[in-house]
Amino acid sequence: MQGGRSHSLSKITALICIVLGFVLAGGGGWLAVLGGSVFYVVCGLGLMGTGLLLWAQRREALWLYAVVAAGTLVWSVAEAGFDFWALAPRGDVVLPLGLWLLLPFVSGALRPVSFWNRTPLAAVILAGVGLYGYALTQDPQDVAGVLPRAQAVYAGMQLPGDAAAVPAQDWPAYGRTQAGDRYSPLNQITTGNVDRLKVAWTFRTHDLHGPDDPAETTDEATPIKIGNTLYVCSPHQIVFALDAATGRQIWRFDPKLVVNPTFQHLTCRGVSYAATPALVAEAAAGEPATATPTAVPAACAERIFLPTNDGRLVALDAKTGLTCPAFGNKGVVDLTDGMPMRTLGFYEPTSPPVVTGRLVIISGAVTDNYSTHEPSGVTRAYDLYSGKLVWAFDPGNPDPNELPSETHQYTPNSPNSWIVSSYDAKLGLIYIPTGVATPDIWGGKRTDIQERYASGILALDANTGHKVWFYQTVHHDLWDMDVPAQPSLIDFRQEDGTVVPALYAPAKTGNIFVLDRRNGQLLVPAPEQAVPQGAAVGDHVSPTQPFSQLTFRPKNNLTDRDMWGATMLDQLVCRIMFKKLRYEGPFTPPSVQGTLVFPGNLGMFEWGGLAVDPVRQVAFANPIAIPFVSRLVPRPTENQVVPPNTHDPAAAGGENGLQPQYGTPFGVELNPFLSPLGIPCKQPGWGYVAGVDLKTNSIIWQHRNGTTRDSSPLPFGFKVGIPSLGGPIITAGGVAFLTSTADYYIRAYDVTTGKVLWEDRLPAGGQSTPMTYEANGRQYVVTVDGGHDSFGTKEGDYIVAYALPEATH
């Protein structure tokens, strides 16, 4: 009986080895022909030989398999070093199968068999266990270091970005200040007590994905806090005013958003706040409002400005949530006025505007990759009180400051700016991160004027809208490598007492461009370097691109050995897929063949940006590393015309998949570079946290961040380093906070070393940037957790506030 069972298992195992070996040898042969590793051929032949010997019940099967397993270990270390997660798919079939072969009820049928016949394979398996165990203790990708500790604050220090000092207890703008620093001077929560944080209150918005919503419905909001009130918007741009200490709703405003599935986005990143001190005082005293440049009722002395995805800018009374009737048309400005097309969903302001002493300045997103005739990416300034248009900057117009009239509309497809801008009140400049004239992935029809202010940082006089300077981070952008995040402004005081006003602009490429914000001159060199050539038919490629010396971009180009999988089999498939794509490093042009884009379309930096401590002069970042594939799809000549001013329902919604690019010779298919199992083909890590010394402009530490807890079919949280969408904040307590990862956690980090000090499970995906404030003497940390459809995280409608237990703070 025992011998018969052993015989059957041996035959079944032999068949498994033969089939597995045939697949590896066949796929490996294909890879070798493409110029990749020949190991899979050798391994496959060894497995087939093992299977044949097993079928013949020969003890040499164990010896041959010992050679296969030993060769696999040597090859694995040669390719991946001692990075456990890179080693895992190389051995997770071979080693378990070897262990199976050692079992008496499998190998017992071999003739002759003895303990000594099993010894070589057992020794190899034991060495493999030791090797993998050692690799678990190593992380070659980890960079350990210590950031500078707190410095003495120089007398009279004032943060750039706001006309007056921001109260320490408040968070009155998207980045707390309009300098985009995401820094709070609060220090009640410290590295020593952050592990005692508990949920203080939770608020539910009840705003969830509806039947008419687009595929990319997201909750990316960062609340703002002024006085005792928290203001936050939800995906359908419903605004909630909450009591900052309790989370109790004070008022709610619903703009009755008009939306349909053809929208590319449905999201709200936040709202903006403005106040006129004189009017605030009058309102508090119950006195009539005094005259201002535009007469304003005292009831709207404090205002909340809400951008809506259907193209409106709404002014609300911060105290009541009612619209301000003197602003625009009963509290609303129609942002489609003057546009070359006004079709619903083509123009979507998703980020809060900049507010100056007299203006509200707003930009907006346009639908990517739809056609060559879309709304303008114009930036406009409106009177803070009346809503009257004061100036415009239309990047695609020869005269960018030309206002619309009966004979003039804004220029179609002017480069747009979809994220928050920064503002320096002292210099009177607004810094606008710009994108590219859509369609993004083929630019053969773009004019020189359309590209003049594309993919860079545009500095305008905030009062007039006139250009002061422009710095381009990508020339003739064919990769959607726009500047995706609010720039961070910081002042450096040199040893001789002079102050250098700097701007840090994180780019999708992984570069951080450091500029003098007075004139746009580089403070950190970004020399032009040659990049791959050979654009698609009818297009061209810039011969060089700027590469900042402060960068997170990969040090080396990817090779097939950087491909990954859950097993050796899907890793082999990824290696074949990689070799079939065009890839010559960063800025490889899009192609009909299919181009690997790395850093990918999500970029190494996204809209979360940096968190900057202006006192210690350090920054906290969360770069990501996910390749994409860009494949141009030729279009018949007769189908290159621009469609009517309507969305094609079959081609709208979301930014992945097939995009039409009407008006060009090509559509484009954009997708993350994933294995057949739906996991990234590039080996982890895919997401990190990092600390930057801004005095030396160097990366001091970098660690993998996040686990597979919510993205793996197995209920385990492996710390491989996963992507994040959202940004960090940093506090004077030496603690940074970040949600945004594909697992549902809020984490607190020691800014000095990057060590995780505390984490808590979130009720849904936290693809947003948190914030912190003080109310009634207690410091709170608040996160919006609503999920992100295209990122694949769980939907929710939660706003969660954390604080120390009242007896301990």
Image (cartoon, rainbow, N blue to C red):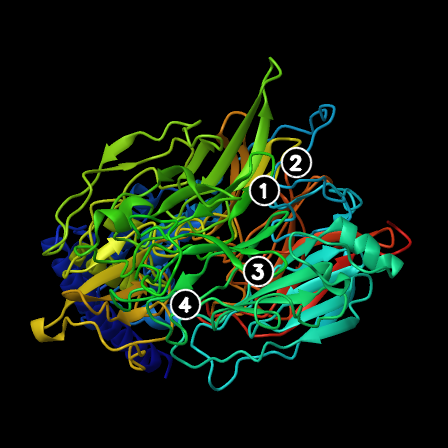
Residue 273 in which image quadrant: bottom right
In terms of secondary structure, where does tag 1 sit?
loop
Amino acid type, label 3? Ser
Label 4 neighbour load within 10 Å: few <14, some 14-19, many 20+: many
Marks 3 and 1 in Cβ contact (< 8 Å)? no
Q: Residues under labels 2 and 3: Cα distance?
A: 24 Å
3 or 1: mark nearer the eye = 1
Residue sitting at x 20%, y 42%: 542
Query: In terms of depth relative to the viewer, which is nearer, 98 or 206?
Result: 206
Check disc 3 and report the residue beneath it: 768
Q: Residues under labels 2 and 1: Cα distance?
A: 8 Å
Residue sitting at x 20%, y 50%: 583
Q: Residues under labels 4 and 2: Cα distance?
A: 34 Å
Check disc 4 and report the residue beneath it: 347
Quarter of the image with the N terminus is: bottom left
Q: Position of residue 580 (x, y in %)?
A: 16, 58
Marks 2 and 1 in Cβ contact (< 8 Å)? yes
Please say whether residue 558 is visible from this viewpoint.
no
Q: Which mark is residue 179?
A: 1
Q: Earlier in the sequence, mark 2 or mark 1?
A: 2
Marks 1 and 4 in Cβ contact (< 8 Å)? no
Answer above or below: position of 796 versus 165.
below
Residue sitting at x 74%, y 23%: 155
Check disc 2 and report the residue beneath it: 159
In terms of secondary structure, where does tag 3 sit?
loop
Q: Earlier in the sequence, mark 1 or mark 4?
A: 1
Please say whether residue 381 is visible from this viewpoint.
yes
Label 1 neighbour load within 10 Å: few <14, some 14-19, many 20+: many
Q: Earlier in the sequence, mark 3 or mark 1?
A: 1
Q: Position of residue 717 (x, y in %)?
A: 55, 61
Amino acid type, label 4? Tyr
Q: Residues under labels 1 and 4: Cα distance?
A: 26 Å
